[in-house]
Image (cartoon, grey):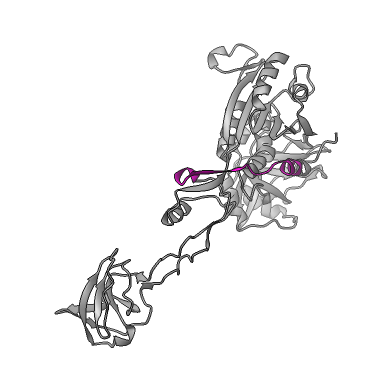
Amino acid sequence: MCTPSFEEAVRLVLDEVSPQEPENVTLLDSLDRISAMDVSAPWSTPRYDNSAMDGFAVRAADCVPGTALPIIGYMPAGAAVHPVVKDGTAIKIMTGAPMPANCDAVIPFEAAEEVSGTVRLRKLVAPRQHVRFTGEDIAAGEAIVSEGHIIRPVDIGVLASFGKKTVAVYRQPKVAILSTGDELVENAEELAPGKVMDSNRWAIAAAVRECGAIPIVLGIARDNAQSHRDRIEEGLQADVFITTAGVSAGDRDLVRGMLGQFDVRLVFRGVRVKPGSPTCFGHRGSTQVFSLPGNPVASLIAFEEFVKPALLKMLGHKRVLNPFLPAILATDGCKSAGHAKLLRVRLEQREGMFWAWSAGKQDTGVQKTLLRSDALALLREERISFAAGETVGVQMLNPATAELVDAVIRLTPTTRHGATDIGSVRSGVTSEINIGCA
């Protein structure tokens, strides 16, 4: 089995997954879910011509400045009776009230003077002014929610205005999460020498929930076949099964072999990228299986690059990849041959461009660097050295920021920036950390 490149591995994952089946949920429960079908307006809105202002409904042709029109009645919002307004008369009308059939304009109270049962006009009146006409907002049959749309409060309000009580959305996948290793403990009281807290399960569960899927925490599989067998059998009942650790070549790395015993078909075993190179992906039936590294930093980065796009596609999202946006390297960088590298970086914006600085030590055992990071910078596989001033792709770790920035910035050809440009940016930075070459 060939080890795929970073880009190939992402494609292989997305080729294997599909959106979940639709389910009907209540309007309120549909918030932030993905619509599974187009929804069309069953009727036009407004359903009838109505006043857009408090004022007087009139025929525009009768309105000459200085003229006084007799007021023949009153139309509140919700009125069921529509009086006949004869030529040369007016009717007092409230916002939202149906327009009388013979009227084609509304004069706001502030634009007229009411005197002794008449309305005196101060200026010319244009036909159709301050009238909301049938269907001018949404026409019958017009799409109000499209398949693949993320449902927001405004969508729920519009759906409710058409009498909808439920909406079809893609089902949220259930994601089972399993940590592995005898060194892991669940409580600080158990921290004997050689033991570490199991943080992966909580970080991965939080990332799953952030995507909109449902995390199921299975606990810890100990380094023996029976413990692995019991927990893996349970995990394979979910839509997605994620394991952390146990996928390398050590004598206690049991996950890969045990998955084979459960007939999990591997799509790839390892990826040419660091962090995350031990990542495996496969499936058994409809269950997608991801085996991530045990190192907390590598595990989260592998989730971001491979698991998150899969979950977003299963949830029905149309846009599932976090784009790489252009940024200028502020320091020289290098890496070893044969793989891509994802650097944890901080970003500064100067003169319309992002500049990328190492967020700290790039060892995968250093979690603080990821805490400080704004983005991941991609050093591509085909090169080993990168000079300060070159443009590289950076992937925002805040998805909301990524969408906003991507709306206004597009990848540009690789360019070089001189030392003077870099120096001007460095002037505001207190320290500089070189990028390692691992």
Q: Is residue 11 magenta?
A: yes
Looking at the image, residue 389 lies above or below residue 114: above
Give the side of residue 129 with respect to residue 4, left or right: left
Find the magenta span and give its range: 10-30
Residue 1 rendering spot, x and y as whole percentages: 85, 34
Name of the residue lying farthest toward the left:
116
Q: Residue at left 56%, top 52%?
A: 149
Residue 353: quarter of image = bottom right
Residue 412 rendering spot, x and y as whole percentages: 71, 58
Give the side of residue 51 with respect to residue 300, left or right: left
Give the side of residue 332 with respect to residue 200, left or right: right
Looking at the image, residue 217 lies above or below residue 188: below
Residue 165 rendering spot, x and y as whole percentages: 44, 48
Which of these two is toward me, 17 or 328?
17
- Is any part of residue 363 visible from this angle? no
Question: Which quarter of the figure is the C terminus placed in?
Answer: top right
Give the side of residue 197 with respect to residue 71, left or right: right
Looking at the image, residue 25 lies above or below residue 225: below
Which of these two is toward me, 10 or 69?
69
Looking at the image, residue 49 lies above or below residue 158: below
